[in-house]
Structures are given as C-alpha cells and as structure tokens.
Image: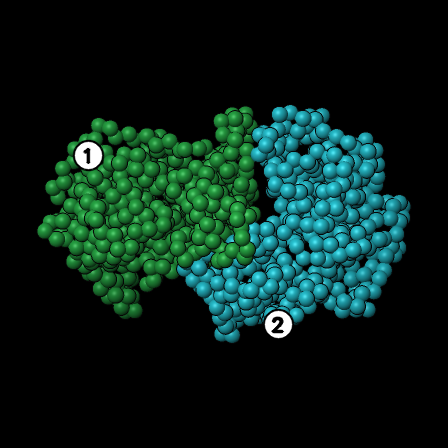
Chain colours: A green, B cyan
Amino acid sequence: MIDKYDVIIIGAGVIGAAIARELSRYHLSVAVLEKEIDVSFGVSKANSGIIHGGFHAPPDTLKGKLVVPGNRKFDRLCEELDFPFERNGELMVAFSEDEISTLQFYYDRGKKNNVPYLEIIGKERLLELEPNLNPDVECALYAPSAGVICPYEYCFALIENAKQNGVNVITGEKVIELKKNAGIFEIKTEKNNKYSALYIVNAAGLFADEIARMVGITNFKIVPRKGEEYLLDRRVGKLVKRVIFPCPTKKSKGMLIIPTVDGPVMVGPTALDIEDKVDFSTTRDGLKTVFNHAQKLVPSIRSTDAITSFVGLRPAATSNYSIISKFFSIIKSFTGTKPEYIDGDFIIGRTTVSGFINAAGIQSPGLTASPIIAEHISDALLKDGLKLEKNPAFNPIRKRKVKHLRSILDEKNFSEVEKLVKENKKYSNLVCRCENVTEAEIVAAIKMGHTTLDGIKFATRAGTGRCQAGFCTTRILDLIHQETGIPVEQITKKGPGSEIVLTPLRKGRDG
Amino acid sequence: MKKKVDAVIIGAGPAGMAAAVSLRENGIKNILLVDREPVAGGILQQCIHNGFGVHHFKEELTGPEYAERYIDQINKNKIDLWLDSCVIDIEKNQDDTKTVVVLSKERGINYINTKAVVLAMGCRERNRGNINIPGSRPAGIMTAGTAQKLVNIYGYLPGKEVVILGSGDIGLIMARRMTWEGANVKAVIELQSYPGGLNRNIVQCLNDFDIPLYLSHTISNISGNDRIEEVEVSPLDENFEAIKSKSFNLKCDTLLLSVGLIPENELSIKIGVKLDPVTRGAYVDKNLMTIVPGIFSCGNVLQVHDLVDFVSEEAKICGASVAKYINNKLEKSKEIPLQKRNLVRYVLPSKVEIGKPALLSLRPMHPAKNMTLTVKTNSSVELFKRKYKNIFPSIMLRINIDVVPEDTEFVEIKFEKE
C-alpha cells in the first residue's frame, strides 16, 4: 500500500518541524519522514540554542536577510507554543584596536540587517553588565534583541502543534529512494515502505545533498562542519547573563559562552570542516581550544567544571563552483594573497525539478531564521502550483503537557509544587534529582512518543545533570518499560543498535 | 505537611542509619531519617559481595546483610524512616532551627522544622564528562556502579566484551562480577602508576581471573556510533599526556568507569556549608559539625572511606555530637588548626581541641615505602609517631593522637623518610 500525501517533508529537525507547522495552517495532507528514531535527533540536537541578534551575516545573503525577521517571530511563537525563551541579549567583545574596528564593521552590518537597539558600549558599562568578563576587555557590540531557547523543546513544540493540526510524523523512516514519475514523487524507505506526494520539501540537514541528488539536483554539496561544545555544572551558576562572542575570525564566529535557557553555561563550539557525516567524536584538541578561548573571555571558567561534552555537525552548503574557488583561494594563499573564506548560504526554495523544494544548508543562524524559512517554503510551494487554502480549524496553541518541577523549585515556589502534587501524584516522585525531574514529566514524555533515553533526556532534561544519568538510568528504564511494555533489553539510548543492556541474566522482576 | 523534630538525617545509607541509631542511643527520640530510594541501606544493597563488617561486627557480611543489621535497629527503635523521599531545600530560620523541605512519593511536600541536620548523602561516581574522554558518544558507556545496579538488582548484563577504566574498588569488584556472569573483561586501565583500589581486590578480582591491569595508561579515544565498538588505550608520559605512538586498540561493547567518587554536597553548599577542595567534603570540627551551626556531616559525603565499618564508626561519633548539640551540651572549646605537611593529601578533622586527644583520618599523596608519620605541636611536642613500611592513597590511615597541650598554637602532621 502506498501512503499518499500532498506534501512530504524529509527531515524532522527544527527546519522540517517549522515547515510542518507552517503547512498545517492549510487544508493539506502533510507527512514528515525522519530517519532517526525521534525528532530533533540530527543536526538540531546539538544546536547552541541562540536566537541571534543578526549582525553576523552579510546583508546580501539569505542568512542576513532572514535572521532579523526570524528573531522578531519568537515572542509570539513562544507564547503560542509554550517553550522557554529569554531575550537576554548578545555581546561581541573586543580586546584590541584591531578588534574595535571589527566591532565597527559588524555594527554597520547589523544596521544594514535592521538589528534593533544595536550599540557599541564602553568598558565601564560592559563590566557592569557582565562583571565576570575578562577585565582587559575594551568594548563590545551589544544586541539586546538576541535570546536563548532550548532547541529540542522548540522542535518538539513545533512537531506537537503540527500533529495537533493533522500532520503525520513518521520517525525511524529513512528515505532511500526518491523519484518523480508522471508528476508524482515516489518514495521508498529503508523499511521498504512506500509513500507518494505531489510536493517534496528537502529538510534533510546533513543529507540534503543526497536527497537532492535522487531527483537529479547536483549543484550543491553539504560539508559537515564539526563543532564541539562543553556543558558546565549548574553549580557554577550563570557566569554571564548574555551570550558572549569573541570577535570573529575568517573561519568562524569563534568560541562562545552561552547561558542556556535551562540554566547551566555551555561553551563552544569549535569549527572544523570534515568529510564524515557521522563523526560525532570529541577530541583532546577541541577541549583545549574551547577552554583556552572561553577563559580569555571569562577567566573563571574551568574545564574541571565540565559535566559533559558533545559534537554538532553544521550542514554547510557549498556550490560546486565555490568548492573549486575555495581550492583556488588556498593556492592563492600560498602565493601571498589573502584567501577569501566562502561561507555557505542557505539554499531555500524552488529548484529545477518542479515540486521539489529545498530547505538545505541551514546552519547558523538557521534556528533564528526557521520561522521565516518555513514561510518562504510555503511561498515556494505556492509558486510551484500548490493550492494553499486556510484551514479555519488551525489551532496555533500548544501547551506543555506537564510543567517542569525544576523551574518551580528554582523560584522556591513550594506552594505551587503542593498544588501540582495534589493534581498529579507522580510529581512527588523525583526520578532525576540533579535536574529535579519527576515521574510526571517523564511519563508525559513517554506518552508523547519519546521512548529512548536520549529522547527523554531532550524532552525533560533527566540525565543531563552532574551525575550524567548514573543514578536515574535504571529508574527511567523501569518507567519506559512500565508505560510502553518494551522489554528492558530492547530499550535504547538513541535507536536500534544502542541498547542499554544486552541480556537478561535471569527472569526479570515481572516474570 | 508540617512537622517538628530534633534532628533530620539526610540519607539512610550506612552513615545515616548509624547516626540515627546513635542519636537514639543518646536519648534523642524525635528524629526523622529520609532517603530517596525505596529501601534503606544506600549503595550497600547493590554490593552483594562479602567482606563488610570485619571490624565492626567481627564477621564477614555481604552489603545487604550489613545494611540489614542497621535496618533491624532502625525498626526496633521505631525510628521514623521516610523512603522515596528527597530533600529539595534546607533553610535557616531566625531562631537557629532549620526548615528541611522534603518531597516524598507517599507524603507529597513536607516542611520539617528541626534543631539539627545530619548530612549523610554519600557519593556519586565521577563520569565520562568529568574526565573528558575524547571520542564518540555511543551506548555502552556507564559507571561501574550503574553496571553493578543493573547486574545485581535488575538482573541484566550490560555487555559481554568489557573494558574498565580506573582501578577503584567498584571497578575491580565489577571486573570479577561481570566475569562470573559470562562477560569477557579484557583489561582494567589505570591512569596512575599504582592501583586505586585495595590490594585484596587486585588479587581476588583481577589476578585470580587473569584480567590484565595496565598502570600509567588511559583511554585516549572511544569509537562506535550506536554502541561502543573500540577503545584506544595509550601509555602516559610523566606529564600524564597520552603517548599516541604507543597506543593500541581494544574491541569492546561496554566501557565501565571507576574513576573516583565525589561527595554529593550540592545540598550542603546551598545552605552555606564550606567544602575542603581536596576531599570535596565539608570542613568540620572535631564534633563533625560544619561551619554552619547545627549542621553535621558524616560518612562518604564527608570523606570517601575504604571500609563501611569506619563509616558506621564516624556516624556513631557524629550522632553523639548531634545529641549534645540538641541538649545544648556541646562544649565550646578552644580549637587550633591542624596543618598538613609533606605527603599528607588531607587530614580530617581540620582542627583539634586543646586539652583533648583526637582521632584523625588521613591519606598520603602517593604510595611510598618506609615512612614515619609524626604529629607535632608548634613547640615540637610529639603527639604521635609511627613507622609504616608502605603507604598507599587507597588506604586511609586512622590514628589516635595524645592530648594537645595548653598554649599550643597549631599542630602539624607529616610523613618523613626514615
């Protein structure tokens, strides 16, 4: 049997999710196919969670054009979708005369990009705003409109809202064949399931080039740009209130200090172009680089305060032309000419294949731009002939199923805890106590379909704290088993092949 | 619910239970013992091997048996024990009492007003993030304690081809345990040039099963995407940098970490208890009271012990001090600093009392042969002297020193080569 849809979106990262929600405004049959076992498990899971102010990208690029309008959308989005968002601002700091002129350059660029309330602030005010910064700092470019969100919670919220409004989300479904036949796209997946659609949206992240190649589009390539990030213990506190950037180099925005919306500070990422799209390994060099750079910004940061590290791969798009010119520029650098770094822009919109729409090469500031990218994609679909008829039943509101106990405890609002416990007794059973996550939150996550340890970690933060799931792993295994009936030996960290235990030694406690 | 007690003991492991029993023996009846687990006993419940209680009960017990002895006393004394209950906050009140906020599975949220608090939360295991092992992030990497719980309590084998990083006691015990359950333990890798665990465990858990121990080695990379497939093992140079040219690979499906314990003092920090950066336990006086009056600490949350027997003993002393505090009989005496010198990694307590003898616990920085340990006052009065053939960081020394004479300004403790 073939499942037929008007639109199939390939990839359920933040981009696929934002597009799915956008399309759920209309009378359409839409499906999202995700190769991983859960949504947000690809590029998005390692996103830094910054809603950028918008002074980094050049004004003539899509990145530069979409970042500020994207940023503006987040107040309303956060209200509609109930995910944590804080407009805490970002600072690009300068330590030398050279860097001060770099700030000026980015100030001008930010103005062209329409970044609101942008200003360069002097040393005194800067240290007043951020007393833990290196006192050698001279001044900073300040964008108060920047903010932080939790990238997977945003993604989950978008997906849940899209589902509420009729979108079909199918995980663990890897597209291995895609062809256009008599005006209809036919898809075959690894599990040998078949789908067909009138339109395809390619939001396949690192693998967007491979999906495009299936329909004969070969004019771009996705290069994974690896970034290592390190998460510090909550105990360290919020060393900074705002996201801190160094002055960028040719190659990257530099190592940042990010006060995450959930509390702990994150430092990183590195930036290294690699070949392997599944190389998620951290390195000794990465660790040294991140902490050396971070300590230059905030001297009290210590690598011994790191509780975990991870790698993200940014899907940087390069046209085949730019690969060649990059090659030449390297040669030029040997002859003394400064190489010009070619930064891959977003590849968004219609293609030479009618009905096949790209949302590819979405790296920073892709999270910020995601709501606008979604609108651009629906425009492109319209231009390619898709009828967009408003669905009057569309409900933009998604409420979190359960409140997080952690945020209530942070405010020491114990009477609120009392109320919650009265409503749902599972709130009184603390499962992960580094991050104060209760059985109520974990069961809700399981019921939303997050049945892996990583899925539950992303949905609830259970296991992200200082003991790194040392104590709660067994409790969560129990809860997944209880709620779903999946045998414990089949429960995985992040999908098939990543089982937590191999064999039952004897009949389990239930048997 | 609101409740008023004389003492709240946080953690019903060996330390908390012994402190509670000791409080009772010292006449304090209105006490509350809380633990987050569904059974009392703490980590003892998953330690099904024997060797516990040799000093304290003069017989070899398993962990659960040792715990049972104390659980019986808790029951016999009708001590109020709340299980599945987690302390989420402690606050100081104006009248010097404390309010302990407990979230309990059965009882919901509770505010306990108490004169004294005993911190007995024990330790957690250091994990991969704390030691920053580079490489991929697959399934199959866990602390030795998590593996112990999976095997001994849950009845699941985490894997069959096992490498263990760190030669702490739990790692050694798990090397044997996994072997008994049919796994192939390929190697134990230790960063230091000497083992981290007790010698009897090296012999009984590794040597008896021909499991190789690589000293001065580390794991320099982890590979495998879904499940761990291989670790890269490298010897270390004198600066603890991996010598990559001499590294070799071991195929495995499981990596267990036994790389040290960290006292779980996050709650203590919240209420202003100051920690010793070396032990990561609280600074305490000879009564085991922290710098916050009315808040005491004992067991592994104070210092990581080698033997549970000594945890019980320390908690018993602690319980007696708390009883005195509750009855306003804790003597205010003159305390002077105890300073650690040559080779002494830490010594506890950090202060001694004029006119009294004292029991000290300490560990050396590294292994050494033929050392003399002396404790002297600033005017060179010798309070203790003993020769040791061998000293190891893995073996805690416990010594009784003589009465500290009047007019002493400080006491120093040091190892010297004979």
Neighbour tally class for label 1: few under 14, some 14-19, many 20 plus, Cα within 10 Å: some
Q: Is residue B387 visible?
A: yes
Residue extending farthest to the bottom is B246
Residue at the location (19% across, 34% down)?
A27
Badge 2 element: loop
Residue at the location (81% across, 31% down)?
B327
The chain containing the residue under callout 2 comes to B
Question: Pointer 1: what residue?
Answer: A27
Badge 1 element: loop
The chain containing the residue under callout 1 comes to A
Q: Position of residue A121 (x, y in %)?
A: 40, 39
The quarter of the picture where residue A272 lies is bottom left
Residue at the location (70% across, 33% down)?
B80
Q: Is residue B19 visible?
A: no
Viewer-nearest of labels 1 and 2? 2
Kindly check if marks 1 and 2 are in contact, taking CB atoms under 8 A apart as contact.
no
Q: Is residue A39 left or right of residue A300?
A: left
Residue sitting nearer the eye, A477 or A70: A477
Neighbour tally class for label 2: few under 14, some 14-19, many 20 plus, Cα within 10 Å: few
Task: Please say if B417 is above or below B226.
Answer: below
